Image (cartoon, grey):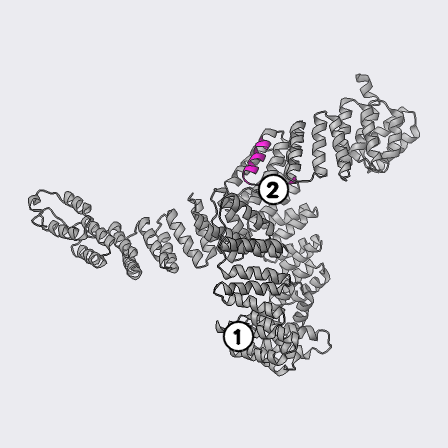
Amino acid sequence: MREAMAAFVAKLTFREMCFVLHELRGWRQARDFFAWMKLQLCYEPSVVAYTILLRLYGQVGKIKLAEETFLEMLQAGCEPDAVACGTLLCAYARWGMHKDMLMFYAAVRRRDIVPSISVFNFMVSSLQKQKLHSKVMHIWEQMLEANVAPNQFTYTVVIGSYAKEGQLEEAMDAFGEMKRRKFVPEEATYSLLISLSVKHGKGDQALRIYDDMRVKGIVPSNYTCASLLTLYYKNEDYSKALLLFSEMEQNKIVPDEVIYGILVRIYGKLGLYEDAQRMFEEIDKAGLLSDEQSYVAMAQVHMNVRNYDRALQVLDSMRLRNVKPSQFSYSALLRCHVAKEDVDAAEDTFRVLSNYGVPDVFCCNDLLRLYMRLGHLDKARALILKMRKQDVQLDEDLCLTVIEVCCRTGMNEDSDKLTEEMQENGMTMKNAAMVIQNEGDSLKASTDSLAFSTTLKSLLDKPGGLSNASQLITKFAREGNTDEAKFLYEHLTELGAKPDDTAVATLIVQYGQAQQLEQAQKLFEVSSASFPGEAVYNAMVDALCKCGKTEEAHRLFMELIDQGHNGDVVTISILVTHLTKHGKFQEAENVIYRCLHDEAELDTVVYNTFIKSMLESGKLYSAVSIYDRMISSGIPKSMQTFNIMISVYGHGGKLDKAVEMFTAAEELGSPIDEKTYTNMLSFYGKAGKHQEASLLFSRMKEDGIRPGKISFNTMINAYATSGLHNEAEMMFQEMQENNHVPDSHTYLALIRAYAESKCYSKAEEAIQMMLSSSITPSCTHFNHLMFAFLKEGQINEAQRIYNQMKETGIAADVVCCRAMMRMFLEHGYTDDGILFFETECRILKPDSYILSAAFHLYEHSSRGSEAGDVLDAINMNGASFLRNLKVGSKLGAR
């Protein structure tokens, strides 16, 4: 190197030497050149030069040399910066030296040096590849503490690690933050979150994530589709599963064997056994039949229709094709043999299962049940002893089966011993609880419950015994077994034990749902004597609401608040909803403003309930005020919030504000649902903005929402308001093409459109269409046509429509009678008007206009006595007398 660089001695600046070092590709050349650099007069130790050398060593895996270089840099008095430290960290990460990387990272952080985001990405990616997900999360947390802004790659890695560790909430938090920072997640990220949500039983969340994915135009992978199909299968939402399969075909997503297997199960659940068989054969023809789960899925379809021989054939074909069986397929085989009551084959299969380890509780239960069914009680006892030796953890069903075997074989001592062992071994509450349930069911009918009380007392003497008994009361109550829950509650109180508030509250709520208010009140009174917590009070409020006793519920809730307790958000929401539903608007308002005044901790649902209550009571200003309070309190808004506020502003005539709310809903990030679209369509229509309504309706369809009947009715109404009967008729046709059967509301909107456009014959045809479709019109359907004729002065036509309505058997309402009386009065048809009043109007609720018109008609006909009677009726009913009405007023005008 000295010979090669001899001509450059004293000619290169330090900057130029660093440039040469940076351009070298071989690590040996770089090492030697750096040694030459240090001999030059212009050389000064610099972190820049050392960092360049560190990068070269790191790229080729010369970690030892990199460490020596870094140490030399420190000895030379160069303070390492974030770049130098980051370079060595990346070297460790690149070559999988995670312990060294984390040790060095800790040292770097002690010097308050914060690596760049690219270095953090290198670190977390390397850790994730080695499945060190907990380390990924640790680095992520430290990164956030250091205020380093993550990028899309960071979020992708971190969400992946959270998902792999099953930490759904943390993964969703990171996902939400990722979207707030305007990063678009990859399909793999969506897929992981959907799968994790399904595994955690959060199906609605999984579907929301999928909808968000669809809105962004991201095509799902096979893995995502498989997760969604699994969800639909678990929820028995088979129509959506088949729809998703159709979408896969449209997007040219080739299904794999897992997806085909799920579809086989779905067809089986739907009873479409031939389709399931055909799908299974298609998998075979496509050369995809290699997974045992596909065979087991088809076998289960056959078992569902009790075709056990076919199921055994499918499982046998799997073996012949050298598909390696596991416990999964042997469990299915055992169920087949048990169903066929083939003891020898079942025992052989159970022995094979035992080679994989202790058989699961389902297999043990199946074989025990077979022994009991065939009377092989000795074998059943032997199996139980074997299970006890193998320390099988009994679940609820197996526990019941074991106890039943003990009872049937007279093994009472063994049963008691088993119960004690289960409790001593710290087994779950379910097992001890099921013992109590089994004995309780048999003892409730007897007068002597001493044995049950003894068992219960034994449980209470164990650690956590009262908690277990309380949980059992809760379990019974939630399952609707209120008699069992009450039975256990009474025995506990007799023994001087007080079940916890949660158990009592759950039982009270169930009494309310079953409309057993007296039982709920008795339990509440007994519990009140021992100063219960808020849960019991809240439960009683809930029970009173469900039983329609809203005033008592309101009084009890206010007592709870006055005593310094806080009603929980669910109770507050239920109470306000029921008060509003029963027209107790003032009481609902009292609850709302008391909660706001006391600054109770309220959530989105409660605020939505408050706003909706004010909307339904007509207090729109108060609804807006509560919404503003919600915003200032930092409560997150939901789609329901915006939908309600659209209604608030729409009913208040503030269409521009309603549009603002709709726009804000779109910015929420979640797809707009049909209900919100339809709500906005309705207010556009009422304001005569049919073009805006039409554009929004088209947008709704572009967003993948298939309009329902209500949406179509709303659009027909919008066109009717603007007098556009042709557009209304086209919408009516489109509605039928979309397989929606028109209802009474549809025809009402269509008749209104024709009447507004003076297409009277078509309006009459629409009424006839209703009758031919076995839909009985109401008076309102005829009113639109009658009013249109009256407005045009076509008295005879209006009278004809009225007579037609009467012939159909439809009684006139107040609005109709008021219009007819106005016609008779203003056109001077005195005798016809009096006859109409006497035959049609007397059965109606007293109306000021109808009675006043009748008085003037009688007076004009010089029938003072009848006029006086009508005047008396006006006074008796507190109606207003309209003196300025005049008979024949329209005749003078003509």
Inspect the image, locate mark 2, and give the three-letter code of the amino acid beneath it: Lys
C-alpha distance separating marks 2 and 1: 57 Å
Residue placed most toward the observer, 23 or 829: 23
Q: Does residue 533 sit above or below 686 in this rendering?
A: below
Could one spot residue 148 in this view of the protein? yes
Magenta residue check for 574: no
Q: Mark 2 near mark 1, Cβ–Cβ under 8 Å?
A: no
Return the x and y of residue 688 as percentages of the image width and height: 63, 29
Q: Which labelled disc corresponds to residue 313?
A: none
Task: Count up the numbered dots.
Answer: 2
Return the x and y of residue 51 as percentages of the image width and height: 21, 50
Element on which disc 1 rests? helix
Element on which disc 2 rests? helix
- Span of residues in magenta: 692-709
Q: Which labelled disc corresponds to residue 675?
A: 2
- Which residue is tagged 1? 351
